[in-house]
Image (cartoon, rainbow, N blue to C red):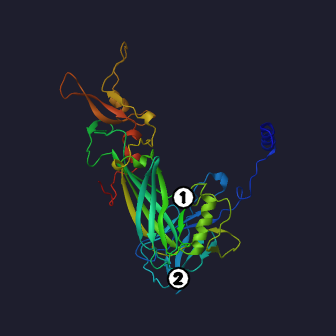
């Protein structure tokens, strides 16, 4: 057995002699097509996202592909053109396709043409339930589903999280640039907002080794107890896709290669092939797997009052959220300077380098009833929740 001195020496020799190795994928001069999405054969929209791969030294930056021509084709020679949106998204409203046909994707971009294999329609069975369990350090969210016909067997899930939150302070006043006015707290409130986030990992599951096609309490995501998502009300919409065995193998391989790097289509360490090919140059890799089918969804609400008394961590720097008392006129004790109108200096429009503070509440005179001397105020990020979300309540939102 080696002594600890020998082990340390071995480590020093190893680390001192090793050289940085940059595998070819890091410095690859080409960027390859990435295709994300599925064809919905029903009344819901079909959305295909196109992007280019980036090398590993690019910190996972997104690289959307614009200006492409994207069409859905059937094995009966029908064609459906998708409309280009923003950030490399191509979409169509409900296609209402014949469920008995097979479909593929044709993409023309940057002088190259890409085709997917023809794929049959595989609709997802309903999600039985989405539930959660409370742990010491947060909540685990699970999904339950089954297919009585034993047709699905392979599944993928993604989700959209939405949460209701408050700004640090509730503002009852606002400035129009030169005057402080009472705020319309119904139509112009900036205290309560909603914010959303999407799946950051690949979530898959299979019942292939079971006698029945049943998925029981498969984990979807974990929300830490300190997360600001749990500060008031939280909701998660889980979307479930049924996959073929080949599609599942693709997502399983992609998960192994990307899960430690970030989001689904960030920089890839190895080449991963799907069912989409470059017909202009078959040697050019394409990352993506096209599936066709109608997904199923299920929404869960979690309310803070039903959770332990956890202390959530604000998603902004609260050190900058101290009240500032802005008085109309202020002269520092012992100063011979002229009075400074602090409301104009810090709240109303001014030519200073920083943004004006947002007024919060009035500072009343202790001697003259109703006389406003000035206002408390704070930095906009501490008062205006719309800087981090939207004040428009989602149509599906509910309270308890």
Q: Which residue is mark 2?
A: 102
Front tag of 1 and 2: 1
Q: Residue at x 58, y 72 (%)?
A: 247
Please tell me in which quadrant of the rendered image residue 383 appears: top left
Q: Which residue is mark 1?
A: 201
SS of the residue at dot 1?
loop
- Mark 1–mark 2 Cα distance, whole angstroms, equals 29 Å
Residue 178 visible, this angle: no
As drawn, the residue found furthest toward the top would be 334
Q: In the rendered structure, find residue 312 and report the number of the disc placed on it.
A: none
- Mark 1: give few (<14), some (14-19) or many (20+) Cα within 10 Å: many
Q: Is 34 situated left or right of 218 in this image?
A: right
As drawn, the residue found furthest toward the left would be 369
Depth check: give the residue in front, 124 or 168: 124
Which quadrant: the C terminus? bottom left
How many discs appear? 2
Depth check: give the residue in front, 303 or 324: 303
As drawn, the residue found furthest toward the bottom would be 76
Which quadrant: the N terminus? top right
- Tell me residue 258's x, y (percent): 61, 59
């Amino acid at each position: 057995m080696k002594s600890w001195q020998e082990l340390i020496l071995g480590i020093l020799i190893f680390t001192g002699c090793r050289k940085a190795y940059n595998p070819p994928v890091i410095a690859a001069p080409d960027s390859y097509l990435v295709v994300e999405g599925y064809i919905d054969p029903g009344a819901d929209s079909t959305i295909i996202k196109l992007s280019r791969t980036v090398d590993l030294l690019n910190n996972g930056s997104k690289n959307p592909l614009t200006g492409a021509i994207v069409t859905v084709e059937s094995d009966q020679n029908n064609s459906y053109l998708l409309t280009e949106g923003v950030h490399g998204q191509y979409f169509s409203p409900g296609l209402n396709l014949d469920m008995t046909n097979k479909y593929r994707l044709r993409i023309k971009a940057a002088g190259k043409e890409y085709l997917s294999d023809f794929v049959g329609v595989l609709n997802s069975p309903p999600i039985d339930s989405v539930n959660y369990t409370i742990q010491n350090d947060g909540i685990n969210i699970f999904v339950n589903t089954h297919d009585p016909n034993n047709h699905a067997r392979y599944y993928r899930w993604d989700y959209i999280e939405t949460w209701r939150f408050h700004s640090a302070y509730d503002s009852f006043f606002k400035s129009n640039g030169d005057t402080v006015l009472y705020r319309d707290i119904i139509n112009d409130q900036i205290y309560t907002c909603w914010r959303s986030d999407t799946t950051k990992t690949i979530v898959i599951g299979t019942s292939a080794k079971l006698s029945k096609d049943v998925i029981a309490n498969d984990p979807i995501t974990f929300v830490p107890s300190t997360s600001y998502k749990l500060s008031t009300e939280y909701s998660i919409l889980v979307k479930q896709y049924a996959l073929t065995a080949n599609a599942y193998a693709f997502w399983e391989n992609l998960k192994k290669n990307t899960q430690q790097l970030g989001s689904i289509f960030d920089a890839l360490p190895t080449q991963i092939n799907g069912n989409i090919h470059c017909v202009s140059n078959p040697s050019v890799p394409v990352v993506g797997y096209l599936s066709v089918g109608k997904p199923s969804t299920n929404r869960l609400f979690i309310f803070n009052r039903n959770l332990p008394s956890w202390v959530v961590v604000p998603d902004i720097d609260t050190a900058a959220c101290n009240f500032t008392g802005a008085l109309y006129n202020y002269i520092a004790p012992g100063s011979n300077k002229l009075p400074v109108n602090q409301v104009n200096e810090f709240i109303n429009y001014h030519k200073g380098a920083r943004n004006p503070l947002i007024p919060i509440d009035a500072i009343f005179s202790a001697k003259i009833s109703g006389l406003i001397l000035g206002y408390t105020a704070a930095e906009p990020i501490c008062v205006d929740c719309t800087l981090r979300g939207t004040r428009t309540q989602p149509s599906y939102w509910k309270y308890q």
